[in-house]
Amino acid sequence: MRREEEGPLAQPAGASRPSIRPRGGRPALRALPGGGGTVRLGPLTETLGFHLRLAQEASFAAFARRVGDSGLKPGHYAALVVIQENPGLSQTALGGAVGRDKSTLTPKLTELEKRGLIRRDRAAADRRSYALSLTPAGQDALAALQGHAAAHDRALDALVGPENRQAFLDTLRRLLAGLDSDEA
Amino acid sequence: MRREEEGPLAQPAGASRPSIRPRGGRPALRALPGGGGTVRLGPLTETLGFHLRLAQEASFAAFARRVGDSGLKPGHYAALVVIQENPGLSQTALGGAVGRDKSTLTPKLTELEKRGLIRRDRAAADRRSYALSLTPAGQDALAALQGHAAAHDRALDALVGPENRQAFLDTLRRLLAGLDSDEA
DNA sequence: TATTGTTATACTCTATAACTATA
DNA sequence: TATAGTTATAGAGTATAACAATA
């Protein structure tokens, strides 16, 4: 089992493999693999942050399962999307958009280039930087990934309930905006 | 800046430091730190998974900011909570509850023990295993952490809106349960 | 001087496998 | 043989710092 998420716990008190059994509708107990019994999760149980974390991890894992064999990781997908949406952007700009340092992106972009999915052309205007773009193969790969992504989001929609979707999304955006402005 | 979260992107297309500027209420563009302009995030923008991810990261970061200086990481907090809720449990049981391998927990528990926050007593019944418990100091530390956690959750509640809290929580639980049963 | 991208290095979190001491 | 915990090792993901090329 591959773990792609971070730490266990805390507010972020998640389990990468959320094998929670809703009891009375609540993930209060966690059955142990060993069948040894259950463990109480205590105050974590009624907390928004905790559930946010678990839901995100579950969503992440489900997506990873869907994409799976393509060999392309989530990071590659995001890079491809942003490049498609902003052809010609620089690596630094991509990093900013995606929240990663340029040095983090270098190996990923190198790999995408090796696979023939993107092009790195020296920018005419500023020859220090590369203008990133998708190759036709990259567009195909992205289209396939987007198919997975769409399917995944449909699955999420089904669980959320179509009638709740907008409210749910709005709430997430509110959290995002509110916590963000809170930033140190 | 410490990054504790995982990868960038994809469905999981997040940015660890979500510096998104809602435009017309939507995180569609991301202003670049360099002030260079904005980058379109494309289809990621209307996606539940994407927002789930960003909201979770923002929540995580906000929590980390709150706890900050204590030196105790989220992982430690979760361990303390579960130990308090289940005094005498074993390391393996704790790992199961928290979704981490026992070998992952070993160094963390060693550190908590060194700090005098937990005790590891050989279990009478099975002398291979340890019975974990909190020391008084551990209870104090946990209480302090829980104070932070409570404050954090109040902040989340305020953003979600008290009247939406339950529905939001239910939706998260639905996602969790649905995606989980989906498990490979 | 400042910035783009690369490289070297390091850190965190996590897992698997092998080993010990019990069962 | 099987399990609890430890240790060694590895891998993914990320960051900072220093460097070459270019502005």
Image (cartoon, coloured by chain):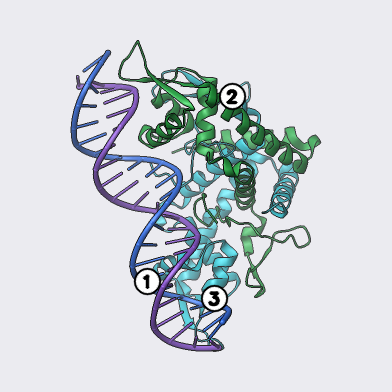
Chain colours: A cyan, B green, C blue, D purple
Q: In the rendered view, would you say C6 is above or below B62?
A: below
State the residue position of label 2. Answer: A42
Could you tell me which chain the residue with mark 2 belongs to? A
Picture disc at residue A90: 3
Badge 2: residue crowd in 10 Å (few <14, some 14–19, many ≥20) = some
**Foreground of the two, B124 or A22:** B124
**Which tag, 3 or 1, sits closer to the chain's start?**
3
Badge 3: residue crowd in 10 Å (few <14, some 14–19, many ≥20) = many
What is the quadrant of the N terminus of chain B in the image? Answer: bottom right
State the residue position of label 1. Answer: A114
Which residue is at the far top?
A: B125
Q: In the rendered view, would you say A61 is above or below A114?
A: above
Type of amino acid under label 1: Lys
**Which tag, 2 or 3, sits closer to the chain's start?**
2
Q: Which type of secondary structure does the marked residue at label 2 adopt?
A: helix
**Which tag, 1 or 2, sits closer to the chain's start?**
2
